[in-house]
Image (spheres, coloured by chain):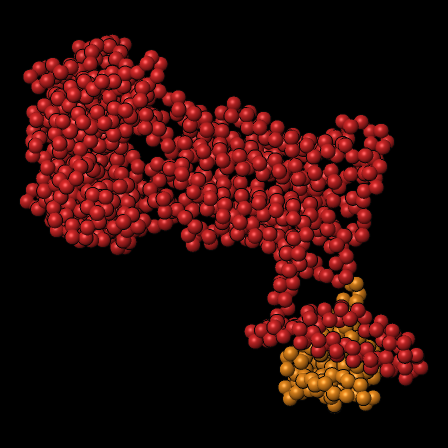
Chain colours: A red, B orange
Amino acid sequence: MMPRRPPTLSSVWRHFFRREAEERDFAEEIEAHVELLAEERVAAGMSEAEARRAARIEVGGAEQVREAVRDVRPGRRLEQLVQDLRYAARGLRRSPTFTAAAILTLALGIGANGAIFSVLDAVLLRPLPYDDPSRLVAVWTEFRSSGQPRVPASGHEMAEIGRRSRSLAAVAGIWVGGGAVTGAGEPEQVRVGNVTANFLSVLGTHAQEGRIFRAGEEGASAPALVVISDGLWRRRFGADPALVGRSLRLDGRLHTVVGVLPRGFEMIYARDASVPAEIDVWRPFRDDVARRPRDLGFLRMIGRLRPGASVAAASSELDAIAASLRREFREYATPGLALSIEPLRRDAVREARPILLALFGAVGMVTLIACANVANLLLARATRREREIALRAALGATRGRIARQLLTESLLLALLGGAASLAVAAGALRALLALRPAGLARIQSAGLSFPVIAFTFAVTAAVGLLSGLAPVSAALGRALASRFQARGSAAASSRAQRTLVLAEVALGFLLVTGAGLLVRTFVGLLHADPGFRSAGVLTFQVGLSGSAYPDDASTKRLFRRLLERVEAIPGVDSAGAVSHLPLDDYPNWYDYYWREGAPESERNAQMADHRAILPGYFRSAGIALLAGRDVSLNDDSDRPNVIVVDESLARRTWPGRSALGKRLEVVFIHEGSFDPTVAEVVGVVRHVRDRSLAEDGRGQVYVPYLQSAREKLAFTVRTSAPKGEGGNPEALARPVREAVASLDRDLAVAKLRTLDSYVAAARQSTRFTAAVAAALAGVALLLAFVGIYGVVACSVAARTGEIGVRMALGGSPARILWLVVGQTLKTTAAGLAAGLAAALALTGLIARMLYGIGPRDPATLAVSAAVLAAAGLLASLLPARRAMRVYPTDALRHDA
Amino acid sequence: MADAESRSDLLAGTLDLLILKALAAEPLHGLGVSRRIAQVTRGEFDVKAGSLFPALQKLEQEGWLSSEWGRSETNRRAKYYSLTKAGRRHLAGKTRRWNRIAAAIRLALQAT
């Protein structure tokens, strides 16, 4: 075309909005031109009528001339776009089924993506809601000698790191325990974050009322201060703004409330660290933690990098610090202390990230399948519009123009689908949140935020272009080559359709296999034996502290009496207590153990989970006693120290022999001090899956509470029930509360829940993953089914005439059927093969999320193949069967 | 189709020049421009409406022509185009350039 200056904004404006006037003007000019031409001819001797006709012919199609002029006008592109859009909209309105099918497919495919992405955005992508979050790090201790990767640190360690590190501007630590808030209202057991005074400021949060702790506000001489959460402030103090400066009774002592944390504040930390997201009360340590024993690790650390320091630099610095600590202190040399550092935003989501990324990959595949379906629909439609496109081309439309028009149509479709997808995304997100996946902090804030909408928009545009390309290239190739053939060869488009079907089947297979593996993992967990029987057991926790229970003797006395009261409740089969309930999020207590008199090499090598118990725990929790006896009320501080061990510890320490009567050196707690103590094994019990349903974990040592007391116990109460059923434990809730209150009005009963609820919670994250994966696989299967159905139906429609001829000539139905569906079946089989190859290559990526099943489990692969094959078969045969019922004469008359 | 395209490509580049030249002497309507060009080139270039009007439109947009409705000699309504001052300058420049190119091509074609 002629080179031209780019149109100015004003000229575009002018021509766009004054188009009508300009059109009229030009029409007049053309008419005048025709008149003048006719005049010439008349002068040359023609008649008026003839002259005018001749003039018109010479001028040519007025429309064409107008088009040529219009092409030159600025704002032409914009005009064309508007025209294309109007035309596309009209076309879509005229084929409602197609439009509905395409929009629905797109809404599903893009909407699901939007929902998962919004979760991803909330949990993984958004920066942490603290000041300058990119400089926050998590610092972990590692015990190389016994292979323990993420171990809490001792106070001394933390102090040394703070002192020696140049890259870290500050280090802080937290240990979350329980506490009782008494005073105005019911006594309430709360989560207490015991922190260093700088913890909240290192984290980078601010109080909404009052202030957070200042440096130096910890230790024995510091005043008793607390900061409380917004939740506690609202439910216990009615959001009273005058609370700041008043006191609160925690564990029997008065503490001054200096501040309230903002609403929605969450402690975002790694899930395996026993640091929950919601902490009710924050309290600085009451002693100098650096002076606590160096082998007592309890702190979960965070740090802040100095400006300009990198994680890598801090990491090598920490390596050096760990090496010098190992050199200088025996307590660090023995376990082979090492330090590791990770940005907090990565460390906090280390469990969630692989799950979310896997789900994102899965939903991406669903979007691709939806894309393929829409492309197929567009291809089928383009086949029907062959003639129209060929006509256009003959009338002078350039390839570019036709391509632009077809692309505009698929973009409009994508836009409509994208808008609908926002509704689907919102609904899907609500469903996701209803599954209440545990351990995904910040997921509640997932919503259709700006990045999510922008992402959806981008996906929509990509889908529109992708799906639009196939029919465009097919249509152009066909239309411009074979102009007016009655039935286009359709070779190019059917090849494209076959490729799309193959891709859909392969992706569908991948998704169904992945979902199958995850569902079987969940089912596996449902049947996993945790080592205890949770049905029909109520649990509750009581913490004793403060002035009413100042020493071991007082706590032992109270808990003995409480156990008696609870056992006496009608409907109770048995009751007991343990310091750490299985599958609870209370910080674990684990320590070294070795055989009495073991050589140095055997000491500090093996670790076991330590539990303090009251008699009756094993029976009420349904933990089988394999040998010997339970601890009894006679095993108190005057008597020899005894312990019960679990079978795995027994097997490891004394393989092939009975553990009864053997002596171990384990840790007992005496007045808060952790003392290595020699004790005799009096019983062996089943191993309990204490931390996770999927893994065995360490061996367990049970020490008698009356010989090793702690401030908090969790009681297990088993209901007596008709044989075969586990009674209703909830019915015991009130009697239990009354029993506690009868001993001490100020005691708070916390976490009154069934043991079953802990087991269910442990399966929560797997349940979430399996449910979402299954839903995605279901959607994929549905889309693939619809896609294949559509392709076959299209092919049948295109070949109705041919079918009619064959039937008229006496062809057998079976052969005709094969003719129609054979290709699709072969493509489906090829798709299965491709999917199988992809599955073998890719399922290894989710291997770590599986339990009890390998990523290449043959049974799952076989079932997926069968499901996809069945779907493909059904989707092919259904439309084909309808074709068989066509009368030959009708088919021949039908102008395909 | 291919033949017509290449011809019109060639024509498009020079058509502007011919139109501007045709209007250098006096304002003309569309048909008049077409006839003047045919006359001056001794029938070599017969510019049809399909090429003429887009070119006139473009030249007017660029500001080298201005137009207004008037009456022909036979008292028929017609749109008359005339050169603007900028148009005249553009014509002069383009003429110089064209003559240079034509001379160069002539030389090239004469060489053996």
Is A465 left or right of A554, judged from the image as shown? right
Left or right: A138, with B23 as reference point? left
Q: Residue A888, percent across and down?
A: 83, 35
Residue A318, by quadrant, is: top left
Counting from the top left corner in percent of width and height, residue A761 is at 34, 31
Q: Number of callouts in the render?
A: 0
The vertical placement of B65 against A328, above or below, is: below
Residue A879 or A59: which is nearer the viewer?
A: A879
Residue A450 at least partly seen? yes
Write the residue at 63% across / 66% down.
A79
Answer yes or no: is residue A327 visible. no
x 36%, y 44%: residue? A444
Q: Residue at x 74, y 40 (%)?
A: A797
Q: Is residue B44 above or below residue A842?
A: below
Where in the figure is residue A341, as x and y percent of width and height? 27, 42
**Residue A572 in which image quadrant:** top left
Quadrant position of the C terminus of chain A in the picture? top right
Q: Position of residue A241 (x, y in %)?
A: 19, 53
Residue at image position (78%, 51%) is A482
Residue nearest the viewer, comparing A27 with A325 = A27
Depth check, front residue: A237 or A315:
A237
- Left or right: residue A403 compared with residue A142: right
Can you tell which quarter of the image residue A73 is in? bottom right
